Amino acid sequence: MFAELSPHAAALRERLIAFMREHVYPNERALLEPPPEAEKWQPRPLAMDLMEKAKAQGLWNLFYHHGPEGQGLSNFEYSQLCEILGRSLAAPEIFNCNAPDVGNMEILATYGSEAQKERWLKPLLSGEIRSCFAMTEPQVASSDATNIETAIRRDGDHYVVNGRKWWATGAPSARCKVAIVMGKSDPSAQKHRQQTMILVPMDAPGVRVVRPLSVYGYEHAPLGHAEIVFEEVRVPAENVLLGEGRGFEIAQGRLGPGRIHHCMRFIGLAERALEIMCERARSRRAFGSTLAEMGGVRQAIGQSRCDIEQARLVTLKAAWTMDRLGNKAARNEIAVAKIVVPETAGRVIDRAIQVHGGAGLSQDFFLAEAFAETRFLRIGDGPDEVHREALARVELSKSLEGAAA
Ligand SMILES: Cc1cc2nc3c(=O)[nH]c(=O)nc-3n(C[C@H](O)[C@H](O)[C@H](O)COP(=O)(O)OP(=O)(O)OC[C@H]3O[C@@H](n4cnc5c(N)ncnc54)[C@H](O)[C@@H]3O)c2cc1C
């Protein structure tokens, strides 16, 4: 599989592995440790320093293929690098490859005007600022995005935004300077043409970050997740992305690459969990043998290898299909990976926790936080049920065509 990497991608992969070994793993504990309350949402000097180092080594914007700011990798190639940086929860931001900024940069690169790119994409690509994506709302079932209620009302040469969002990843950060907000601009339009996306500066009057949200108690500072209120927020009309009524179209385009990147990272996390499961099993003794000699533990290890191989193959197939046929044509493959990988990686990590005993649940290992991360993705980017439903629709229509033939 790695033989298919271009010489450029293969060289980047080697440098990435070396960077992880030299800079990320030794600093991982410090990078993931919750900061003191007063500094919680401030940039961390250690992370900023590592970002500069990664940038200087060309290990920057590895996902980006829209211009010279990235490395021009295909999705298939990036998958194999993303897996490496996915091995540590602390790593994605260091390489400017973290959610939701990656998805937001994709949106701006694909749908942004030249002025929007200049103002927001440029500083995001350089790592100078962070962004958030505000679609989900607490008061409506947001897995059905047509439910979104936030109002985006035209008023002269401005739009006025009113609504409440939550789970906006990155919003609590002091470096978060812009939100991509999805709301309704025309509730009377056709169901999928009612929505608009608009760029809202976080310092615009009326934008209020109400509270941070935690995932199983992890706040993921300094980026975090937040509930935000938009109250009579006035933004210039030119802040609309692509055009009024085209928000749904952008949302569909954004979530494809975003979903697959999460999968790639989780394969790296699962590989690392399997590695430390084996190390621990070899080094601990109980009831007269090492854990590695016990049948139940050996079964867990063997099954984990099977699980990871399956997860990697569906992810690479999705990436390969995106490269050859485009994101839209790859939507079924992306949905399969989005369902299979978080659950599979979660199972592997759960086994590693079990083999570690109490230590596996503690802050001394990355496993507990990694498990929480995989659990979140069974809901984030659309709950698994919604993707299964879409796949079922395709399968059932195939069977209908088969019956008619
Ligand atoms: C850590 C984290 C980070 C996130 N980051 C962001 C972000 O940056 N920006 C953003 O906008 N949102 C973000 N989200 C929100 C996430 O995308 C939503 O939570 C998700 O889309 C589900 O919406 P909901 O919570 O309103 O669930 P609901 O829509 O209320 O759904 C609840 C449950 O109903 C069931 N269900 C729904 N539809 C079906 C169906 N068709 N068939 C069967 N069962 C179904 C599922 O079990 C589902 O979990 C994040 C969430 C988390 C936890």
Image: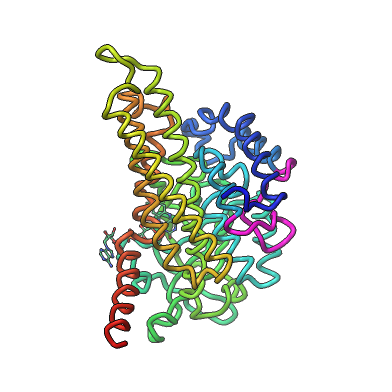
Residue farthest to the front?
A: 405
* Dominant secondary-structure state across the stretch colored magenta: loop
Drawn side of residue 190 relative to residue 297, left or right: right
Residue at 61 percent of width and 66 percent of height: 108
Residue 142 visible within the image? no
Q: On the image, which quarter does residue 136 sit in? A: bottom left
Q: Is residue 74 magenta?
A: yes
Q: Observer-nearest residue: 310 or 171?
A: 310
Q: On the image, which quarter does residue 52 sit in? A: top right
Q: Eyeballing the image, is 78 above or below 335? A: above
Place of residue 392 in the rendered image (x, y in percent of width and height, measured from the top left):
30, 70
Q: On the image, which quarter does residue 59 sit in? A: top right
Place of residue 261 in the rendered image (x, y in percent of width and height, measured from the top left):
51, 54
Q: Is residue 377 magenta?
A: no
Q: Observer-nearest residue: 365 or 399?
A: 399
Q: Eyeballing the image, is 365 above or below 186? A: above
Residue 258 visible within the image? yes
Place of residue 296 in the rendered image (x, y in percent of width and height, measured from the top left):
26, 29
Q: Observer-nearest residue: 341 or 365?
A: 341
Residue at 64 percent of width and 51 percent of height: 5
In the rendered image, the quadrant that contains the C terminus is bottom left
Please give the count of numbered marks on the rendered protein.
Answer: 0
Q: Which residues are magenta?
A: 55-76
